[in-house]
Image (cartoon, grey):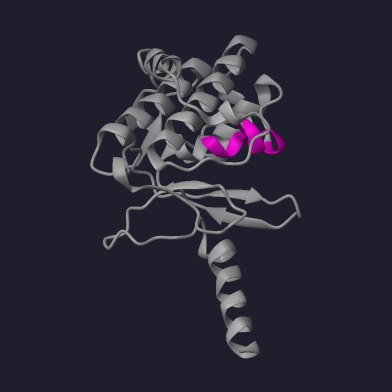
């Protein structure tokens, strides 16, 4: 998994912004939309949208130096949807969908992931101050390869069984639980964790 400390700012359908750190680049990528209920959150409508998301992601790429072609945008959405299904197969959860099979993983999903991971990824560079950066300009294909390789590392690594869905009844964000006790429940304490605390407090006051 990428080891860059990060978090991505998301905006709920009600317009509330909050910081979400899923702990892995590939899980961060799922916030761009997806099958089923994810369609209402779709952000990748044009090639420039993928470049803009890469700037907000933990990769922090300069969108002006990322060349995303229309075919690469289609590949990005295909990889993202395959990752959703592979993640659901790991967690055993299933976000709402009008079509029951929207989140059923198939061998094709694994092929999509492995094909993306086989491409040349973003190249790292070390600056004089010890900071790691990415060699730019870069292509959308390189960025997708880095996302896919991050997923391969996650699914095959020590945290493969720590992929969780948020414990809130109406939140389907997915994260990797890297906490020592392995008891993380919420996508964000700022959002779902705080809402749970408020509901619990009200329930105690009313009892």
| Picture layout, residue 33 above or below residue 69 | below
- The picture quadrant where one finds residue 121 is top left
Q: Is residue 73 left or right of residue 187?
A: right
Query: Whole-percent x and y of residue 164?
Result: 42, 49
Query: Whole-percent x and y of residue 166?
Result: 50, 54
Q: Main secondary structure of the magenta part?
A: helix
| Picture layout, residue 76 above or below residue 1 | above
In magenta segment, residue 108: no
Q: Residue furthest left?
A: 158
Q: Residue furthest right?
A: 14
Given residues 3 and 71, the one toward you in this image is: 71
Given residues 100 and 168, the one toward you in this image is: 100
In the image, the segment drawn in magenta is 30-41
Residue at image point 65% right, 28% down: 99
Residue at image point 30% right, 44% down: 161
- The picture quadrant where one finds residue 90 is top left
Given residues 17 and 98, the one toward you in this image is: 98
């Amino acid at each position: 998994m990428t080891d860059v400390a990060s978090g991505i700012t998301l905006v709920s359908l009600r317009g509330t912004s909050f910081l979400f750190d899923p702990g892995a680049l590939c899980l961060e990528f799922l916030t761009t939309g997806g099958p089923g209920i994810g369609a209402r959150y779709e952000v990748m409508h044009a090639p420039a949208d993928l470049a803009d998301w890469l700037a907000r992601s933990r990769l922090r790429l300069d969108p002006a130096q990322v060349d995303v072609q229309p075919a690469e945008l289609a590949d990005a959405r295909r990889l993202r949807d395959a990752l959703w299904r592979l993640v659901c197969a790991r967690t055993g959860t299933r976000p709402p969908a009008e079509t029951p099979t929207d989140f059923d993983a198939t061998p094709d999903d694994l092929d999509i992931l492995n094909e993306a991971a086989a491409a040349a990824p973003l190249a790292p560079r070390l600056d004089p101050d010890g900071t790691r950066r990415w060699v730019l300009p870069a292509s959308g294909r390189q960025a997708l390869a880095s996302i896919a390789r991050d997923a391969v590392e996650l699914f095959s690594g020590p945290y493969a069984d720590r992929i969780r869905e948020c414990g809130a009844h109406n939140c389907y964000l997915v994260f990797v639980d890297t906490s020592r006790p392995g008891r993380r429940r919420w996508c964000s304490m700022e959002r779902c964790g705080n809402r749970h605390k408020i509901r619990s407090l009200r329930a105690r006051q009313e009892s």
